[in-house]
Image: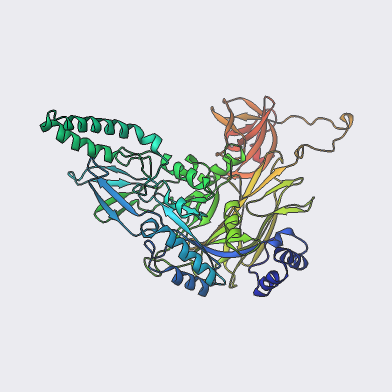
Amino acid sequence: MIRLLRVSHSIKKLVSQCGGAMVLLGALLVVFPSSALALYIQVDGVADIKSNFSEGCSSITDIANQAERQKIDVVLFGDFARNSIEFGIKPFERIFKNITQGPSVLDRGVGGYLSEIKDNDRQFERTLLIPGVETIPFYFWTGSNYDKNLTAHNWDKHLLVFGMDSAEDYEQLPLPNSNFSKKYTHELLNNFIVMGFIFMVMVGAVYKGLFRKITVPLMLLFALLTLNNHPFQSSPFDPYNGDHGVEPYQNLIDFATSKGALVFWNHMETASGISQKGNTVLETLPYPDDLLKTQNYTGFQAVGDEPIGQTDPGQQWDQVLMEYLNGNREQPVWGFGSNDFLCENQEGDSLGSVRTIFLVRENNNDNVLDAMKKGRMYAVRQADANRLSLDEFVVEDQKAGNQVTMGEELVATDFPAISLKLRSVQGGNKTTQIKIIRNGVLVKEETVSLPSELTWRDVGIDRKEPVYYRVMATVSPQDHLVSNPIFVKFAENIGVEMAKLAPQEQPSPPEKLLTVMLDGVEMKKGPGEIFSNITKLRKGQEVSFVRRTNIELNHRNWLVVKFRNRSGYIWEGVLKWSDDQHDAGPNEQ
């Protein structure tokens, strides 16, 4: 139960004087003895904040001062790691090249960047400062200068990296045009050896005086080619040979996570896709499907300046979460709010217009990063200071008395009960639309006046397969929030009736049959189009009616049916009652 919004300074002092976490634990249990979730407090954060180390307008100190004035608890920086784009002349593209470069962390010095954030973090009592970088793992060229259509693609396709402490790790990030690295020498060594061998042959020929008019130019040529193909490159991907798909991004994800970092996809639904850097045309098309194509990243931007389509029911986020639920992905994917802040009041920028609210046991950097890693957070877009606050979002097993919150998993022996408490932080009676999404399907929707409390027991599931729930709340496109999911799995055999009549006391009811009205009707593993098929049925085949779910599509329900001893889901719009049982459709049963 998430009932605390801030830890008071008096409790913090008590903790430091009397033994830290144990005193805090005892104090909170006295105040809130009924729920272990009372141990979580909400801290108010902003992420993807750029300082003047890259393209931001303000210093780290100025940003920290502004955050304290606005009562922001956490600032996660996202300055550009490397901010340069290069176009070279083949076959000497790494030697003879035009460079367009902006300020960046690697350009100005990672050590200074980390040190300045750390020093300011010590000085500011309320606001935590956490380093991070925004990375550009890859871009590729099409067109030519001659035709005046030279274009760099995917320049604005970015990943945010948080939680790396080592300057060396930042310097070794696999980025184009970055520092020398030994990491990819085995992949790039062949060309270097071939060019180097030919160069040495030419040196020998020149030394012996053989055909100097030919061998001297060749020696110089292969000297340049050897230098151009050196194997100590920062990335194994060449921008001159087309698109490499998601490989460069997966490569960066794998490197950063191997160093203990958290990696988030950023602004995947770029509005226009066309921009310019200097005289270079940049084109980056929206890339929401990369959520499905990559693995082992931490999350993605679920809330930004405009509503993000990936969070809609059944879209890419739900598809990824279903992959996790079905065992096809090792870890869930979490949503966070990306502020994308450069300069106050420039092009609509405002510090804190998008926030991420973290659920932590204690307000420090490690606990915030742990909440990010484990999904104990929700994201908010606010039109003004009176933002939405999700004071409680838990799923409870009422029979056992257990409950969990965002990012956690409940082992249930009962139908899950979802409890919400929603308000605006400065009061008022905003009208808000609340959506509860289960396994990618909108299962409950209500319009309420804030503040509001809602408890809903989900009896429309068979309690056999695991589920997850997440919440969206919307006042307007500029005033909404998106929660992270809560997972529920069920104790063995909980979906089977535990108490049955003896066979002689339990007559079998007559079987109810439905007829398929179209060829190719799909029987699915779950109540929605995102679920995989069990089988396809032909027109005229019959299935046994089991029950109706409360999940609708175009005002018709999904039904649980059996076909040849296999259970599944079929939308009732493609079924009718068999003629000898009922003259009407399934809706009337």
Q: Which residue is drawn at 12% across and 32% down?
A: 212
Residue 63, picture quadrant:
bottom left
Extreme residue toward the left, this view: 213
Q: What colour scheme governs how the chains and residues are painted in the rendered image of this protein?
A: rainbow
Nearer to me, 583 or 345: 345
Along the horizontal axis of the image, is 470 left or right of 310?
right
Where's residue 11, x and y in %? Answer: 69, 72
Where's residue 384, x and y in %? Answer: 50, 70
Where's residue 9, x and y in %? Answer: 65, 74
Count of labels shown? 0
Residue 393, picture quadrant:
bottom right
Extreme residue toward the front, this view: 208
Nearer to me, 210 or 509: 210
Nearer to me, 434 or 354: 354
Q: Residue at x 26, y 46 (%)?
A: 87
Q: In which quarter of the image is the N terminus?
A: bottom right
Along the horizontal axis of the image, is 15 left or right of 84?
right
Answer whether residue 324 is visible to the viewer in this image: yes
Where's residue 586, x and y in %? Answer: 65, 37
Q: In which quarter of the image is the C terminus?
A: top right
Residue 127, picture quadrant:
bottom right
Answer whether residue 49 is visible to the viewer in this image: no
* In this view, 282 is above or below 514: below
